[in-house]
């Protein structure tokens, strides 16, 4: 018996999360369901991709990840179930899967072919598909195989001999800025040379182990558990204080 995780932009004020979980309970009371978060910003695919991408691999292989974000899809109503890195994903065809996988997943099927559109696809279409997979059902039994998905592309790093140009991909609960600049990119381009991280009007000349390594109120850079460069202010909200948000530019410059 597998595990289902549940991620959505449904929030915590209404009954929407409970309705989906009630459907799963009705279909398979023995299947455990773990909430990742329901605080994804409404319709924000980039936010969902960041949160899911940061945590899905920590779950056991075979886990089914139910995603109820912008669940009517874009630009047309379609839904998919997919396998990627020994995990399963059920979600609307809204660009999330190509962003998460940096391309199409290993196997993908279309759900609900020929069915009328429902007002609650996560409850009525995605949840039953997640239960099927969690019970060990085969992916192709859910619908026809496809390679056609709504494509959104990840912004690519700009790599030069003495510089990396990246961007903020997420602002977390504390106002810390997570970038798309990886530890690997910094090591390959940097070749052990001194560097300076440039953002807003600030510069930082080292990456430390944790945000508290700096004095209170000082800007600091760390690598998070996904080995992404992050910018914070010890005991402060970096996004608000620096005026940086999603897609703000961050540069790492290396000595010649």
Image: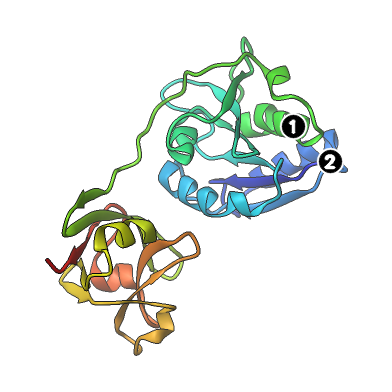
Q: Secondary structure at mark 2?
A: loop
Q: Residues within 10 Å of mark 2 (few under 14, many from 20)?
A: few
**Image quadrant in which you'd find residue 256:** bottom left
Tell me where residue 132 appears, x and y as whole percent: 77, 29
Tell me where residue 115 appears, x and y as whole percent: 64, 13
Outermost residue toward the left in this view? 256
Residue sitting at 56 percent across and 51 percent down? 11
Residue sitting at 48 percent across and 59 percent down? 226
* 87 vs 215: above or below: above
* 132 vs 8: above or below: above
Tell me where residue 23 appears, x and y as whole percent: 77, 36
Label ID, residue 1:
2
* 252 vs 204: above or below: above
- Cα distance between the residues tagged 1 and 2: 9 Å
From the viewer's perspective, tell me whether residue 150 is left or right of residue 187.
Answer: right
Residue bearing the label numbered 1:
133
Residue sitting at 47 percent across and 18 percent down? 148
Tell me where residue 172 appears, x and y as whole percent: 43, 63
Outermost residue toward the front in this view? 191
Q: Quadrant of the N terminus?
A: top right
* 20 vs 249: above or below: above
**Image quadrant in which you'd find residue 119:** top right
The numbered mark, 1 or 2, whose residue comes first in the sequence reads 2
**Camera-side residue: 104 or 219?**
104
Outermost residue toward the bottom in this view? 215
Judge whether residue 27 can be spotted in this image.
Answer: yes
């Amino acid at each position: 018996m597998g595990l289902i995780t549940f991620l959505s932009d449904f929030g915590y004020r209404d009954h929407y999360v409970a309705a989906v979980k009630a459907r799963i309970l009705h279909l398979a009371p023995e299947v455990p369901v773990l909430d990742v978060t329901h605080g994804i910003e409404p319709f924000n695919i980039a936010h969902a991709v960041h949160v899911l991408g940061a945590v899905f691999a920590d779950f056991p292989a075979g886990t089914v990840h139910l995603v109820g974000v912008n669940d009517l899809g874009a630009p047309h109503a379609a839904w998919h179930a997919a396998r990627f890195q020994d995990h399963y994903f059920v979600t609307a065809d809204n660009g999330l899967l190509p962003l998460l996988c940096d391309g199409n997943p290993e196997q993908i099927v279309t759900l609900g072919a020929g069915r009328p559109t429902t007002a609650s696809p996560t409850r009525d279409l995605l949840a039953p598909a997640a239960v099927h997979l969690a019970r060990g059902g085969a992916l192709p039994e859910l619908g026809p195989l496809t390679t056609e998905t709504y494509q959104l592309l990840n912004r690519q790093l700009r790599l030069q001999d003495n510089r990396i140009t990246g961007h903020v991909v997420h602002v977390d609960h504390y106002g810390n800025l997570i970038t798309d600049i990886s530890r690997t990119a910094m090591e390959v381009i940097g070749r052990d040379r001194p560097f300076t991280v440039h953002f807003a009007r600030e510069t930082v000349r080292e990456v430390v182990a944790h945000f508290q390594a700096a004095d209170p109120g000082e800007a600091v850079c760390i690598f998070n558990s996904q080995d992404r460069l992050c910018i914070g202010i010890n005991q402060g909200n970096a996004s608000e204080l620096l005026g940086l948000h999603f897609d703000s530019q961050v540069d790492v410059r290396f000595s010649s």
